[in-house]
Image: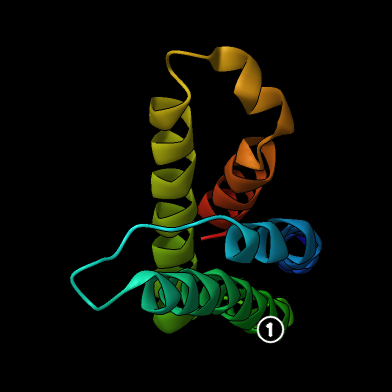
Amino acid sequence: MMVGVAGALCFLLAGGHTLVGRSVLPALRKQPLPASSLGGPATTAVALTVTWYFVTIAVTGLAVLLLALAGRHGSAERSLVLRTVSGVFTAAAVLTVWLARRRPRRLLRSPVAGFIAVAALCAVSA
């Protein structure tokens, strides 16, 4: 049950990421961006867009994986996957808190609570 909840939370996180991207990504294209090692400003904009959507796709994939594991119990593979997903979301939570350390109020609008919840649900279920 807890793994299913973690999967549902991942779907919510992916959906929220997509919604935020719909306002952030067009605004990026309106501002002059710096060139990167990949190319000029247009290349930077494409790289940011691809990365943004890749995160959404990856979190959606994790949601599907967790929902598929929700009905399975007791295998070593299930435990390994749940510990791995827990570690990924723990790392995301730690990184988010670290990046907001100078302005902790930013955490109120961040997905850190979702990261911690998914990490805890997966760790307990492993």
Return the x and y of residue 7 as percentages of the image width and height: 72, 68
The percent coordinates of residue 106 (x first, y second) are 62, 24
Q: Give the residue at x 48% y 71%.
A: 45
Left or right: residue 11 versus residue 122 is right
Q: Depth check: 22 or 79 in front?
A: 22
| Identity of the residue furthest to the left in this view | 37
- On the rendered image, what quadrant is the N terminus found in? bottom right
The residue labelled by disc 1 is 64
Q: Quadrant of residue 30?
A: bottom right
Q: Is 68 on the left or on the right of 34, as rendered?
A: right
Vertical comparison of 32 with 67: above or below: above
In the rendered image, the vertical position of residue 87 relative to residue 70, given as above or below? above
101 vs 114, left or right, is: left
Q: Which SS class for mark 1?
A: helix
- How many discs mark residues in the rendered view? 1
Colour basis:
rainbow
Q: Does residue 78 appear in the picture of this structure? A: yes
From what the image shows, is residue 23 above or below residue 104?
below
Front residue (pair 95, 42):
42
Choose between 66 and 30: the one closer to the eye: 30
Image quadrant in which you'd find residue 62: bottom right
Which residue does the image show at 26% across and 78% down from the upper left? Answer: 39
Residue 33: x, y in percent?
43, 58
For image coordinates 71% across by 76% down, the residue present is 70
Q: Position of residue 92 (x, y in %)?
A: 45, 48
Q: Residue at x 71, y 24 (%)?
A: 108
**Residue 4 in view here:** no
Judge the density around disc 1: few (<14), some (14-19), many (≥20) Cα neighbours within 10 Å.
Answer: some
Identify which amino acid the numbered label 1 is placed on. Val
